[in-house]
Image (spheres, coloured by chain):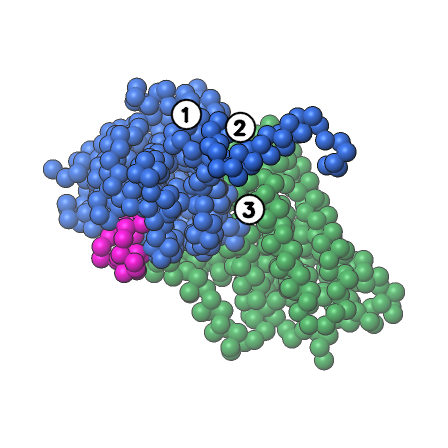
Amino acid sequence: MTASQILFQQIINGISIGAMYSLLALGFTLVYGIIELINFSHFNVFMVGSFIGLGVLQAFGLSGQSVVLTGAALAFVLSVAFMVTMLASGALGVAIERLSLRPLRHVKGPAAMITTIGISYILQNVVMLAIGARSYNYANPLPSTSWQVDGATIQLREVLIWIVAPLLMAALNFFVNHTRMGKAMKATAQDQEAARMMGVEVDRVVMLSFFIGAALAGASGLIFGLYYNFTNFMIGYTAGLRAFTAAVLGGIGSVPGAMVGGLIIGLIESLGGQYLAVRWTDVIIFSILVLLLVFRPTGLMGRMAPNKS
Amino acid sequence: MSFTTRSPAHNRRALLTTAALAAGALGLSAAGVQAAPIIVKIGISLPLTGADAESATLIKDGALLAIDQANAKNMVPGYTFVPMVLNNATATAGQYDPAQAATNAKKFLSDPKVIAIVGPEMSGDGKAMSPILSQGDMACVTPASTNPDITSPAFAGQYRPRGKAVYFRTVTTDAYQGPNMANFYKDDLHVKSVYILDDSGAYGVGLANAFEAQAKKIGIKVLGHDQLDPKDADYTTILTKIKGLGPDAIYYGGVGMAGVKLIKQAYDIVPKMIKGGGDGMYGTDLLTGAGFPAAQGWYATIAAPHLLDDSKASSWVKAYDKKFGKQPSDYAITSYDAAEVILHAVKAVAMEGKKVSHSTVRDAIQKTDLMTLQGKVSFNENGDLMNKVISVFEIEHNPKYPLDDMIHQYKYIGVAPQNAS
């Protein structure tokens, strides 16, 4: 491979990793945008989602990468898997909100955020104890098709992630900006009290934002499994931390910011690994984050929180 | 139980006890009344959950089998052996956790009945446990941890501040495992250039460095050496870089957490490159986690002779299978041997009429000269095994057997050469 081919390949790698971070960052940003809560349980809802997806795929009789589907069968299996995973993860998100965060909503200070960290650990440990701690070979019906483009290899599963991630982001953007419920969310984000006076059911809106955030996390979990062909109870940690960084980098609370932030982190990871060393990846990512926050505290595309006048 | 519902049997026992007490009080011999056996505990500390849980369980069962057999045949009359099994993997680490290993070492020391330890499996844990055990003068016999620093005299001040060896091994060390594999790469696989990876753990870094030093010495070109974060999911970046550099082979020093992902992604990006690792790549977790065809063709080593196919071990393998319902690994044998070393040390101490304590047992372990399953086990003054054999395996899928059947999925290749030609 020539130097330019390697660069091209690493950009492809970076965009794929980045798309995953973006998708995971969306859920963060959504919940933060509505109730200004950094929801750390999001990491592990993502992890649970990858196991739910694995369960659905196994229920179809798939195991490992031995069964390959194409055409309508593939589309059917994948859409059922996405639907079940997103609904189940969404329900988990709603349960977390209803049981542990709603009672704390009016408590000032970091109590709610700390609670989400606690929930994150609970999810992680429950999965470890219930399912086991080793890495699981993911059931994956995708054919291992790949294309050679200018010396670089593009895998089918990379194309999948490039399609699914923007699709979900666009759907979210449309929902927030152009539907009644989305407008209610925006209103709640701007001023809960005023929104309530205008007849917005704030509790429902908050619950809905948790549902959507968790459903997106579940979808990312399933994509993660299909992309890497494995899952374990630990995957939420590194991916979640990078996605959180992506959300902050892009400007937490901003949907386009999450997308851009994710892609930037993905590219830093792949190009930094190529031209410096993999062991420096985290150092580079977090140095850029610190520098950016020093000069632009709201992130790349963030605004100051709207309801803090 | 209330006094009014005493069973006749109970009454009889009470009567006997009274009689025995009376006899004792009268200064008569209480012959025929068996003294309660002395309980001796053998500590076992392994990462029983987490990324290496399956191989750790096989190791644990090897030790348990030895302890059970010793009790069944009343190996040391008057003594009953009880295992005390502690897990040293944590959810935060996702795999073995040296901090937990240190806590376990302290727990063992605080129990006066614990006389020695089988374990640890991981060198990172060993580095945490050894100084604590040295302070308490308690020995551990590791069936799998291979980092040479822990027993090296150069680091004695750090790992055994009290001076005496407390870290014994029934396997040899990475001072042989890494370099001998480098010799195997050159002589048997005809590798001319290599890229080295490790998983940033104590074991992985040490093994990879030992491999690198020997590779350079015997003229294999080392194109680079980078570290993987075991919690990271994506190694495509480094593998793409390696693809661009185009070495003949990859050598990976590390355990399963990064290993499973490396196997999968290396299969996608550099499917034809020669790939190998140490005993961290010898385990069922790798086969079930990575699956085939990805794992096909990976080389792995162990720091012990390969015995599972040996006729000498066949009855043992059957006994293991019968008791636990699964096939053992070679490190289940070294673990059985480690427990044997401890049991025989207790026996030696008891025979001499000395008090069985962790100090006396440590001294007896140092003097071990025992025929075990793997052959003769004896230790040098640092606790290292005198025998130094590195066995090489290649993962080769045998669809007739389940994925976690080590004997049939790891094909034994031979002993790695001590010197490169």
Contact between marks 3 and 1 (CB within 8 A): the answer is: no
Query: Can residue B153 be seen?
Result: yes
Asked if residue A304 is positioned above or below residue A49 in the image, the reply reads: below
Instruction: Please give the letter of the chain rendered in green.
Output: A
Q: In which quadrant is the C terminus of chain B drawn?
A: top left
| Left or right, A44 with reference to B232 | right
The amino acid pointed to by label 1 is: Lys
Secondary element under disc 3, as helix, strand or loop, is: loop
Kindly give the residue lying farthest to the bottom in the view shown. A309
Badge nearest the viewer, 2 or 1? 1
Q: Which residue is mark 1?
A: B73
Q: Quadrant of residue B367?
A: top left
Badge nearest the viewer, 3 or 1? 1
Q: Which residues are magenta?
A: B146-167
Q: Which residue is mark 3?
A: A233
Between the C-alphas of marks 3 and 1, the distance is 43 Å
Q: Nearer the viewer, residue A109 or B126?
A: B126
Query: Can residue B146 be seen?
Result: no
Q: Position of residue A109 (x, y in %)?
A: 69, 72
Residue B41 marker: none
Secondary element under disc 1, as helix, strand or loop, is: loop
- Identity of the residue drawn at 49% across and 69% down: A289
The amino acid pointed to by label 3 is: Phe
Which chain letter matches label 1? Answer: B
Q: Which residue is mark 2?
A: A67
Q: Position of residue A78 (x, y in %)?
A: 62, 37
Between the C-alphas of marks 3 and 2, the distance is 24 Å
Q: Colour of chain B?
A: blue
